[in-house]
Image (spheres, helix red, strand yellow):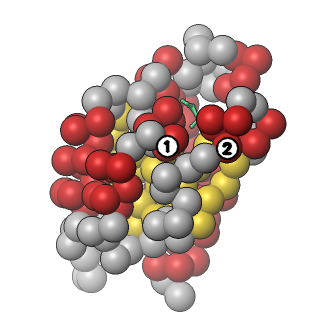
Amino acid sequence: MPEQKKIVIIHGPNLNMLGKREPGVYGTTTLNEINGMLERQASEQGLQVETFQSNHEGALVDKIQEAAGVCSGMIINPAAYTHTSVAIKDALLLLDIPVIEVHISNVYKREPFRHVSLMSDVVTGKIVGLGPHGYQLALDALVKMIYK
Ligand code: DQA
């Protein structure tokens, strides 16, 4: 049997607080619920999935580096680091797999500093403002790219 392809889903700072964190902006779905949904969706597609959340920039960089040569695709919501982290951008540049950037809220309807993403010119594509459903669409897109 061929080895199962693996996808990694990386969540940045404060996303562990989903459900409690600014529900008017991010909704009431928890991170566990989002991860569970994605795990089910991935297994239906015969994919292995790893989910990872950290509040620490270096830990996120380590996880991105680990994916090189191991994973077939990545979904990343770098959260606040989207707008500031050259280190995360540089780590993403190491990868030659499809990477989808996801934001739960529509960052373009929010403060101007959120309109800037240091990641957007290095990722394959990006989904913003669709709530947790954005992750499901990102996974769907990755499946199509991986099995094309
Ligand atoms: C976010 C948007 C970021 O601006 C913010 O810092 C987050 C979450 C989103 O998913 O909408 O933490 O990435």
Q: From the viewer's perspective, tell me whether residue 83 is left or right of residue 72.
A: right
Mark 2: few, some, or many residues within 10 Å (few <14, many ≥20)?
some
Q: Amino acid at mark 1?
A: Thr
Name the quadrant containing residue 29: top right
Helix, strand or loop at label 1? It is helix
Give residue 82's position: percent from left, percent from top: 49, 43
**Above or below, comparing residue 49 to residue 77 in the picture:** below
Give residue 115's position: percent from left, percent from top: 67, 43
Give residue 77's position: percent from left, percent from top: 50, 44
Residue 90 appears in view: yes
Q: Which mark is residue 115?
A: 2
Helix, strand or loop at label 2? It is helix
Q: Which residue is mark 1?
A: 82
Name the quadrant containing residue 132: top right
**Above or below, comparing residue 125 to residue 134 in the picture:** below
Closer to us: 121 or 52: 121
Closer to us: 52 or 85: 85
Give residue 120's position: percent from left, percent from top: 55, 60
Q: Amino acid at mark 2?
A: His
Closer to us: 48 or 28: 28
- At horizontal 34% and vertical 26% (from top left) the residue drawn is 55
- At horizontal 41% and vertical 60% (from top left) the residue drawn is 74
| Mark 1 to mark 2 CA distance (whole Å) | 10 Å
Tell whether circle 1 marks a residue whose Cβ is less than 8 angstroms from ligand 1. Answer: yes
Mark 1: few, some, or many residues within 10 Å (few <14, many ≥20)?
many
